[in-house]
Image (cartoon, rainbow, N blue to C red):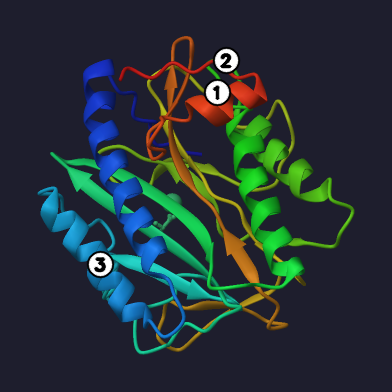
Amino acid sequence: MLRERIEVKSPGQIRLMRRAGLVTAAGLEAMGAAAEPGVTTAELDRIGREVLAEHGATSNFLDYGADWGYPPYPGVACISVNEVVVHGIPGERVLAAGDIVSIDFGAVVEGWHGDAARTFEVGEVDEASRALSEATRRAMWDGIARIRAGARVGDVSHGVESSVGSHGLSYGILRGYTGHGIGTAMHQPPDVPNAGRPHRGPRIVAGMCLCVEPMVTLGGEDVVELDDGWTVVTRDSSRAAHWENTVAVMPDGLWVLTEPDGGRGRLAELGVPFAGLD
Ligand code: MF3
Ligand code: CO
């Protein structure tokens, strides 16, 4: 089997990726703050465009897919409400109190990519939806906590999977969609699956950058892609959450490029060394 090389970045290149990561984080924060009842998903996408423009960044989502024959992606963010798991196309859907909305967004700065997702609560949401989002966020961090030079991608996948499984509830994990390497392109090798076996898969080395992005449902794992070629919904119409960060593997720890604090706070709680450069 031919294996594509995994791109290894220098510290200077990772600093540029941090800039893309901070723009990504700023866009998510602005869109999340605007995710109130009565707002359309198209309006949130417009806010994402404004944040990119303010920072002189470009979108890695807009027109994505055109190069390999998919319908070109029409937004700068994927905005996925309730039963939409991922790749929701921004449009006239109006957010209502009680919805959960997953926003996936990315930025390119000087050719370097950032990519992250958060699930936001619109007004007051029911306890099950809140717990789902929290479990998905937790699974992302539990996966991130397994990343270090010398570990393997399967360790990360296992970290995500066992975290989701630890709640004793029957959450579904999407298996057909994975995290990924990132750098001079948004999607690079290796795939970072959300389930897997420890000690398997590609070896992680310093200078790699990985996106960890669990997609978790309140019901089953089966999904359906709509006729627009993008929107992915749960087959059983259960709600879903999606959290993602771009993480740089440093020689002595991690730098979570798409968190405003570089991951410092959360990594400390998890007992993982923070090794950011700012
Ligand atoms: N950023 C998404 C991911 O987390 C993929 C977006 S697909 C696009 O990997 F078409 F919207 F760009
Ligand atoms: Co991603």
Pointer 2 local density, CA inside 10 Å: few below 14, some 14–19, many at least 20 = few
Label 2: element kind: loop
Amino acid type for the residue under numbered disc 3: Ile
- Residue 47 - label: 3
Q: Position of residue 15 (x, y in %)?
A: 25, 25
- Please give the residue where the numbered disc 1 appears in the rendered image: 203
Label 1: element kind: loop
Can residue 229 be seen from the camera position used here? yes
Q: Position of residue 229 (x, y in %)?
A: 41, 80
- Please give the residue where the numbered disc 2 appears in the rendered image: 150
Locate the C terminus by quadrant.
Answer: top left
Ligand 1 picture quarter: bottom left
Residue 33 occupies quadrant: bottom left
| Label 2–label 1 contact, CB within 8 A | yes
Pointer 1 local density, CA inside 10 Å: few below 14, some 14–19, many at least 20 = some
Q: Earlier in the sequence, mark 2 or mark 1?
A: 2
Q: Nearer the viewer, residue 8 or 80?
A: 80
Q: CA distance from mark 3 to mark 2?
A: 40 Å
